[in-house]
Amino acid sequence: MSAGRARAVRLLLPLGAPLLAVLLALAAGALFILAIGEHPVEIYGLMLSQSLGTGYGLGQTLFKATPLIFTGLAVALGFRCGLFNIGVEGQLYLGGFAAALAGLAMKSAPPLIALPVALAAAALAGGAWGAIPGVLKARFGAHEVINSIMLNFIAMALVSYAGHGLFQHATVRTAEIAPAAALPRLDALAPALRGSPANAALGLAVLVALAVGVLLFRTRLGYELRAVGWNAPAAEYGGVSIGRTQALALALSGAVAGLGGCNFVLGYKHWFELGFSGGVGFLGIAVALLGRNHPIGVIVAALFFGALSYGGLVINQRVPRELVEVLQALVILLAIGSQQVLERVARRMQA
Amino acid sequence: MSVLLFLAAALRISVPYTFAAVGASLSERGGVINIGIEGIMLNSALAYTLGAYATGNPWVGVGAAVLAGVLTALLHAVVTVGLKADQITSGLGINLLAAGLTKFVLLQVFHSSSNSSRVVGLPDLPVGALSRLPAIGAVLAQPMVVLALLVTLGAQWLVFRSVFGLRLRAMGERPEAGAALGLSVAGYRTRGVLLSGALAGLAGAWLASEQHCFTDGITGGRGYIAIAAMIVGKWSPFGAALACLLFGAAEALQITLQGSAFPNELLQMLPYLVTMLALAGFIGRSVAPRAIGIPYDAEQNA
Amino acid sequence: MAPPAVALRAITRRFGSRVANRDVTFELERGEIHALVGENGAGKTTLMRVLYGLLQPDSGTIELDGRPVRIPDPAAAMKLGLGMVHQHFLLVDTLTVAENITLGHEPHGPLSGYRRAAAEREVAALAERYHLPVEPGAAVSRLSVGAQQRVEILKALYHGARVLILDEPTAVLTPQEVDDLFDVLKNLREQGVTLVLITHKLAEVKALAHRVTVLRAGEVVGRGAVAELSVERIAELMVGRPIPPLAPRAQREAAVPLLEVHDLEVRDARGLPAVRGVRLDVCAGEIVGIAGVEGNGQHELIECLAGLRPPARGQIRVAGQTVSGRSAREHAAAGLAHIPSDRLRRGLVPEMTLAENLVLGLQHRPELGRGPLLSRRALIERARGLLDEYDVRPPDPMARAAALSGGNQQKLIAARELSRGATVILAAHPTRGVDLGAIAFLHQRLLAARDAGRAILLVSSELSEILALSDRIFVMFDGRFTHETLPSRTDERVLGLYMTGRGAEQGVA
């Protein structure tokens, strides 16, 4: 096989599996739409035009995509180091809670202090929660997947417990945070987005994506992290401490996830509310998968899933928006399945 | 008396956990992690509701639940054993799929986003004098309680005393060894996954039968607790069932203490903390089957 | 005359462009012990994997008792009465001896219940019959290596093996276990089992086998009755190729030892002693070669010297600095470079680019970036220079290491390790699986490094390489240095004898 063809296969493979998965999932979704007597082309067209075609819709899409960028990056960071961080949901949840606590506490601080402190609180809380399975893995060899699932539930219970004295009477939410700790809405800058909840967390997400990209591909630490993920014995040969690097990767992953909680808490409602995370952590796994664990891919995939989420709301009158959840799940299953199939085809072609 | 009530509650609560955890142990003994238990239970709970709603017969509901469980598990098997894709990701995908799918169907059939119409539950068994036992009698009369007991015993026999179990365990520990003797790795692993689907189906059926309806998210993370119980139970059906009883007792305690000063949430955490301790080796190390999570690729072992 | 029990005729098997077996014919008489000998990579295991259905030949035929057969998989081989004991046992650790042996053909009751007692009885009877003492109810994980091997043999017999292939059966055994194994094999033969013994230890051939077939570079170079062949003759057939002219070497003065090893003991992955008391100095400007059949402790020695495996006892000093027990990074910092034996597992991250692979182990060097940053430009510039200097093809810094041929991957590793400014260089099998052009190039580079005053420790199973490059030679056997010599005073034949066990009684170090 020629070098040119080998390179073509190498470049197409990463794009091929996600695209195939999306197309197949949409096709399967079309069957659902047909089954309830609607027109797939019309419905998909409506989703597309409403989620990307209007300023408000675009704002909604961006708002829905924002936490997914964070969670997708968090999952990707783990994957790059050979670790599966399923705990992103809990890390984001705790991050949001910590941001709210910080925001509540800083009634008199100026924005230049209040906002960074709230953000740092979110990152620290998420990072600490992420570090736990990392340390347990490094120290005891305990599987990070099960531990991070357990920690998701513990985070939920812990927050419920800690929230007792904090929540407003007969609600499951806190009081509003100090205005100084809030992230500004984007419609202040871009009037076209008026009315949508898109906020400055999006800018933060893009910055974090950039930072993750730099960390992974431009720093010594990122180099070690990727070496451990790809070939741990070779990394060890290169003088890298595998355990320490894995623990650090999970802590960083958790910190990124924790920041994701700010979209809702600091940028939208300005309070913490029980159950606000609503599965964006798990969806982050789909985002990372589809985005091939690359920051740019993650942003694109998050926008896709964001558009899908808002598109689901738009069509809800005609097709239940749960269709979108089905589509998201199918994308995951089809992405990992088609990846295996395509890899095998590529191997056959190269043999 | 209150002790008996408590025990009865613990037993009843542990039923769905037991089905699911014992099922998970069958999948994992063969080398396939099944985090999709939660989703399988969800699909099955809906299937029970639909079956019972359509026919008025709860046993038709149970049959539908088992069928739905097996079919959902088949999807997991196709992705992980057939296509050799990552088992954890597939399981999560199945959980998301079930969450969306059940809501979608709920809306279409019952025109509600929160719950179905009321359906019949499973009738009590004629246990005669046994039913007159205080508190416990009522629980023992419930067919699913009895079935859970039988399933646990049967699974324990299957895993450790049958030819099938011997081969299944070989596939979870050292699939190359089995393959070298002419056994089909994919065949045994798939059967392990399908059995776990059938049992998780029973768990789902019980949930819907108990509530006499399907509600959105009816499983509430019980699938994950079941996997935790299986780990604490060291991948054996017996151990898993015992851990389920323990977790059931913790939950019963929560209900008992509701309204008291003791913080409920701390009790909620108990199963998860116990599982983490078990994984870290603090309460007798839980060691997974060695080949667990690793797709078997004959090409790479040639 | 009866047809041979097993006949492989004109077998050819390629892996890509490499020919592992070329036109190999191999015959096995019923009831004999037949030794299949040859150096590493001579094609012994490939041939037996073809026979056992693990590989399909590109051409050639297989006959059993004169009848042509097809063996598509191990299950078919089993049905035909073939059995194989692999070098890495295929046992399920958590199951009992009897369970492992009966797996696949279990005695069972009406409900398909496993009849444990019956299985253990059957295994006990089988063990009794073949004089293979095992405890049927014991968990395999608790057994010694020797006992595990007996379980493997019993498993093959239980499944009906009349022809048993043993792949390097003594490689993992203690001397006492080797004696026991020999008794077992002789007994099996007496009971009519035909045995193939894959080995490169010639003492074993002499002690056990009736006939021998010698493979070299994938071809049969000799066969005959063991009684009629001397050990020297077999060794010559195994390794016999013309000795290449020695490279001219620069004058050197007796110099300071840069690598000092004292009384080193290292354990292998299973915790058994692999290096048993090694003492060694390597001086500036010299290459010390370690000859030996693989699996005699060389791997553990090198991994320990590189800081990848802790020593059980002893001391290692690099350029005067004690590093034993420290991390790999500290070993490297003291001035140590390492060309590892397994380039794909240890030496490279195949998915990374050439530029990235060229800084593995150097990622903290200040000149490669600023602060925490690694400069892509610095990586690429460095890569351009090294790829050119070491003639790595394609010389594309952004190509992935996985895309290179074996020879180019090896040159890539050599480029990185020889350019890192180390004073001590560990080179483990630096030319294994590499084409001739690359071999010459790598040899020339190692000699240049020596002439530049580096201390080089070379481990190789290629005797021609050891002889061509070394200033001093040790033979390693069973975890010890059993022979020390100079290249001018020895040859491949003599080294071959020591490598296969001569001189093991006394030891030199």
Image: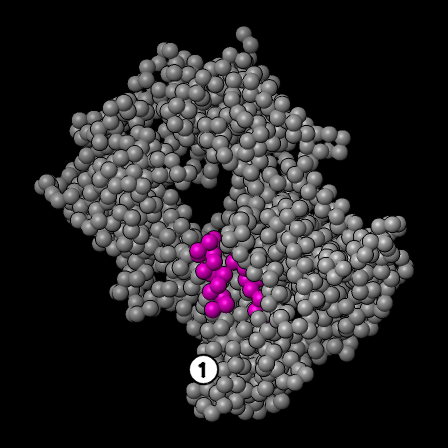
Bin the neighbour count of mark 1 within 10 Å (Cα to Cα): few under 14, some 14-19, many 20 and up.
some
Residue B169 visible from this viewpoint: yes
> Which residue in the rendered view is the most extreme toward the front?
B1
Q: To which quarter of the image does residue B215 belong? A: bottom right
Relative to A161, does residue C185 appear above or below in the rendering?
above
| Residue drawn at point x = 36 percent, y = 29 percent | C39
Kindly identify which chain the residue marked by label 1 belongs to. Answer: A
- Secondary structure mostly seen in magenta is helix
Q: What secondary structure is found at the residue carrying circle 1? A: helix
Left or right of A129? Residue C70 is right
Residue C37: x, y in percent?
40, 24
Q: Residue at x 45, y 82 (%)?
A: A117
Which residue bears the numbered disc 1? A117
Three-letter code for the amino acid on which mark 1 is drawn: Val
Q: Eyeballing the image, is B93 above or below C313?
A: below
Q: Position of residue C407 (x, y in %)?
A: 35, 44
In the rendered image, residue B53, in percent from the top left (x then y), is placed at 87, 63
Which span of residues is magenta-colored?
A128-156
